[in-house]
Amino acid sequence: MGLLDGKRALVMGVANKRSIAWGIATAFQREGAELAFTYPGDRLKGNVVELVATLRDHERVPVLACDVTSDEQIATLFGDLASRWDRLDILVHSIGFSPVEELRGRFSQVSRKGMLDTIDVSAYSLLALARAAVPLFEKAGGGSIMSLTFNAVERVVPSYNAMAMAKAVLESETRYLAVDLGPQNIRVNCISAGPLKTLAASAVKGISRARDLMEEKAPLRRNITQDEVGNVAVFLASDWSRAVTGATIYADNGMNIVGVTD
């Protein structure tokens, strides 16, 4: 018996095999969950389809389009999902985007449009998706929503710039959604992962140094792995965490408690 036997999970944000979302998805399937995936556009569709083909029973796994900046596409996504599934138990929001120029240089030079675009994709999308998912969650009697953040909210991470602002919005949204959706038995939490080597992280100057610092300074003296983040997500998706909502859970080997700089 897996921790997620009988549960259905929509995983959003897979870009390639190094994606945190992919680590979460494989952990979910290991624990018995039925999966569905999205892709934001044709550029990443092939990557997602290729990865899904490696999963057990992949022929039954929906892979659906959704540009989260479009309310129409979000509505279409959940309409399509409702035609396939009678309920939804888990929603994984692992979505982030910022124009590369907003992740370089001085924070004071971040553009208005760059900031707004970053927050729209990386943070407001959680609210829009949660709202659209409620009817399917209600059919399940509740469920678990989780998103991915990074500890650049309380501490300054050079070059994270506009994305740090989006993550601050995301963490605040988590608390507000937890209160708003709690009466419907829908839990909302954040995972703050350490600096994994992902496609999104590659755009942030100095991220490799952050990984080195993890090995040097984190209490556990090692980097976090994709599998370890996946296991935290399994906990949040399972009934074992049914008393946990509105939380930001750190999966960073304790780095968040250490007052160090470079």
Image (tube, rainbow, N blue to C red):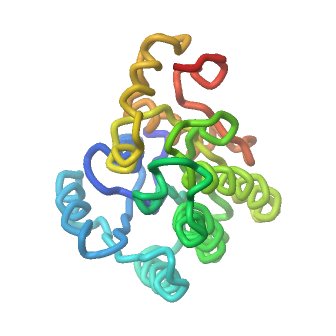
The reply to whether residue 9 is in sight is no
Q: How many marks?
A: 0
Whether 63 is drawn above or below 91: the answer is below
Seen in the image, is 175 located left or right of residue 125? right
For the N terminus, the quadrant is: top left
Judge by depth and name the residue closer to the eye, 109 or 21.
Answer: 109
Residue 178 percent coordinates (x, y): 76, 56
**In which quadrant of the rendered view does residue 242 lie?**
top right
Judge by depth and name the residue closer to the eye, 85 or 227.
Answer: 227
**In which quadrant of the rendered view does residue 223 lie?**
top left
Seen in the image, is 217 located left or right of residue 228? right
Residue 68 percent coordinates (x, y): 49, 74
Residue at the location (54% across, 64% down)? 118
Residue at the location (62% across, 46% down)? 190
The reply to whether residue 251 is in sight is yes
Seen in the image, is 210 located left or right of residue 143? left
Judge by depth and name the residue closer to the eye, 81 or 176.
Answer: 176
Residue at the location (63% across, 58% down)? 143
Residue 42 percent coordinates (x, y): 25, 75
Residue 8 percent coordinates (x, y): 47, 60
Residue at the location (36% across, 42% down)? 23
**In which quadrant of the rendered view does residue 84 lie?**
bottom left
Whether 248 is drawn above or below 259: the answer is below
